Amino acid sequence: MVTIDGVSQMVPSGITLEDLAAGVASNYKEPIVLAVMNGKLAELFRKPEDQARIQFLTTETDSGYMTFRRSASFVMLKAFQDVVGKENNYLLEMRHTVGNSLYCEYTSEDVPFSADLLERVKNRMQELIQANIPIEKRSVSTRKAEEVFDRFGAEDKKRLLRFRMVSRVNVYILDDYVDYFYGYMVPSTGYIHQFDLEAYQDGFVLTLPPKGNMKKMEHFVPRPKLFEIMEQSKDWNRTMKVSSVADLNQNIADHNIQNLILVQEALQEKRIGEIADQIVSAGKRVVLIAGPSSSGKTTFSHRLSIQLMAQGLDPHPIAMDDYFKNREDTPIDEKTGKYDFESINAVDTKQFNEDVKRLLAGEEVSMPTFNFLTGQREYKGKNLKLSEKGILVIEGIHGLNEESSKSIRKEDKFKIYISGLTTLNIDAHNRITTTDGRLLRRIVRDARTRGASAAKTIGMWDAVREGEEKNIFPHQEEADLMFNSSLIYEISVLKQFVQPLLFQVPPDSKEGLEAKRLLKFLSYFIGVDSVSVPGNSLLREFIGGSCFFD
């Protein structure tokens, strides 16, 4: 007897979750790829437990879509092995995402990368998918896994396992290809019904259908500015000789973490100084800073202002949030029926533009402060008049949207996109998503400054990301430049703060699944005390102790 989506039924022995999913697939809009069984994620090739409570997950969910994406990557890796040979396959690295696509690079002197090679890999992927080959999960001793990866030259995987405090690990097998993955898989290759491989820059991109619409195959859309900043960050990683979690853990084990922190902070400060140089050289008077949640916009604006002061300018920070409309004038989200604070229509852009134009004209302006408790804009006698060297440093999620500053001359504006773009990978075949890094930041900050539980922050995260997809990401490439606020060491520091918060999330709650996933993710990292983090670090905005506002 099992219960599926609240309906109890008898099932024959030996049946799998995949068999049960086939019987209810017509009730779901998107393909079923994963299940929740008795409050825990379960792959479809598992057999249901007696009296199990089962809920199926489709590619509309984060867990389901990442399972689909991970499985597609596994099929691609197998195809590469079949084309280039086992001795070259681990030279393929999944570097970072570009929109809905995954950018990869293959570096082998024996079998050089080419358009012809990529076409052969693509054809082999299609053959594997049509053959609908089962994907097997097998538990092996950690020592055995290390021996396997050592034999195939996967040094990063071998070193990663060295720091795992477990005696056994799960590996996935596809025909004769064995690999280690952080996360779950679909039962067979036939689930990967659509994909594309396309050469790009020095490598190629794997493009898949977007989350929530598996029937829609989108073409790869290059994002040159975003790609450039991701590659620059990868170069920083190489400079510090830290490209994977194993590299980071080794630095911690060797007592080299303080030096690593100082070098990373120095690289970021150098970049901020270069940005200030560009602003001054261009003669700009309005700097607009925008980025998704937990990107460190506030600290960045302070550090940029200091660099501008060092250039002889007189910067004045302005928060676009202070121009929120009064609560009664805030738009309502049609989907949720709640106030839509993420919409550009929640901001009094008319007043904002008028005030900025008057400031640039040399007038004295009464500046507002938004009271988030009362939901009202207030004027408390705070007046501002720009000096001859005055420059406005404006922060807000709509800063890149030309609609928010349409009355201000383009010649006066300098737009900066900032985000915590994670470039550190677990290993060559397991990425750390950018959203995970930002979510960990947000959980720590919300608990410290708002008294919010991890469950509350996790519960609202999907809505936050939906707002970003609608209001921020479409305007990324409109920025004059981008800044990556991610720090290569930050997850090791955040671990000490966020682990206790995640353990407080009720395991049987909706947010419990995500908390468990994040706790497993954190288990790959050795923790680091925050004492070595400088007071002006972007990380201090989240963990506390900032010299700017704590």
Image (tube, rainbow, N blue to C red):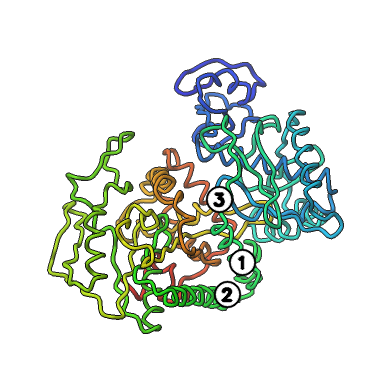
Residue 260's tag is 2
Gap in Å between the C-alphas at discs 2 and 3?
Answer: 25 Å
Dot 2, how many residues are within 10 Å of its Cα: few (below 14), some (14-19), or many (20+)?
some
In-front residue for pair 45/27? 27
Q: Are marks 1 and 2 in contact (CB under 8 Å)?
A: yes
Q: Which quadrant holds residue 422? A: bottom right
Apparent side of residue 286 relative to residue 169 in the rendered image (left or right): left
Please report the residue visible at 29 percent of the width from the left and 63 percent of the height from the top.
319
Q: Position of residue 11 (x, y in %)?
A: 59, 17
Q: Read off the residue under disc 1.
A: 248
Along the polypeptide, which appears first: circle 3 or circle 1? 1
Nearest to the eye among marks 3 and 1: give it: 1
Please report the residue visible at 21 percent of the width from the left and 57 percent of the height from the top.
351
Q: Position of residue 106 (x, y in %)?
A: 75, 55
Residue 520's tag is 3
Residue 505 shows in this picture? no
Apparent side of residue 377 relative to residue 116 in the rendered image (left or right): left
Quadrant of the snapshot with the N terminus: top right
Q: Are marks 2 and 3 in contact (CB under 8 Å)?
A: no
